[in-house]
Image: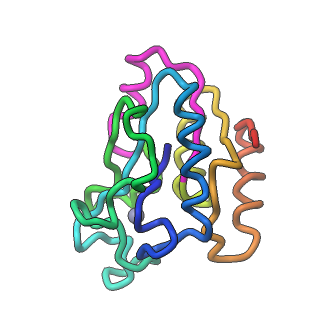
Amino acid sequence: MVDVQNDFCPGGALAVPHGDEVVETVNQLARRIPFVVATRDWHPADHRSFAEYGGPWPVHCVRDTDGAQLHPGLDTDRFDRVIEKGQSNDTDGYSGFERTGLERLLRDHDVERVRVAGLALDYCVKATALDARRAGFDVVVHRGATRAVEVRPGDGERAVEELRRAGVQIEE
Ligand SMILES: [Zn+2]
C-alpha cells in the first residue's frame, strides 16, 4: 500500500483527486493479503522534490507532520510493516523500493507476488510496481484501489499502459 497519507488526500498539500476513495478498497485488500507493507512518503523539510528546491511538487509529507500521517480511515492493524521512503535528498522517493530495504523484507517473507495499491497511480504506485517487476516479482496493480494525480490529463491511462508493457497485471 503506497502513500495513502493525508497530504495526498483531498485537503492535503498535494491532493490526488478522490485519493481518499481508495481507503476502503485498501482495507478490503489488506484483509485478504498475508503480508502487508505500507509505505509513507517521508521527506526532510528541504527535500529536492519541492518546488523551492528545484523539484516539481509543492511541499508535502514532511516527516512527522500531520500531512505525512497515514489516512485515519486505514485499518492499520492489518499492516505488518510501515516503511518510509524519500527520506534523503539523493532520492526522489517515488518508489517504495528506493533505499528502503523493501526487496529484502519481501524476500525474507518468501513473497512471490506483490500486489500494489494506493497513491498516486501515475507516480509512486507506478514506480513501485515497476521496481517490483525489475526485482523479479509477479506484480499486480489493483487499479480500483489507486487514483492518479493527472498533472497532464491521461497520465493515469498512460501509466497503466506502461505497467502492462512491463508485464504488470492490472486488476480492478
Ligand atoms: Zn514526495
Q: Residue furthest bottom?
A: 52
Q: How many marks?
A: 0
Residue 97 seen by the camera: no
Q: Residue drawn at (64%, 63%), measured in percent from left and top? A: 148
In the picture shown, does residue 116 fall above or below 127?
A: above
Q: Residue drawn at (64%, 26%), measured in percent from left and top? A: 138
Question: Does residue 100 belong to the magenta stretch?
Answer: yes
In the picture shown, does residue 165 fall above or below 47?
A: above
Q: Quadrant of the C terminus?
A: top right
Q: Residue drawn at (59%, 36%), measured in percent from left and top? A: 28
Q: Nearer the viewer, residue 72 or 81?
A: 72
Res. 68 image quadrant: bottom left
Question: Does residue 114 belong to the magenta stretch?
Answer: yes
Residue 21, image x and y in percent?
A: 61, 58
Q: In screen coordinates, is 74 left or right of 23?
A: left
In the picture shown, does residue 117 fall above or below 10?
A: above
Q: In screen coordinates, is 116 left or right of 108?
A: right
Q: Residue furthest top?
A: 110
Q: Nearer the viewer, residue 58 or 127?
A: 58
Q: Which residues are magenta?
A: 98-118
Q: Residue drawn at (39%, 56%), measured in percent from left and top? A: 93
In the picture shown, does residue 78 fall above or below 52?
A: above
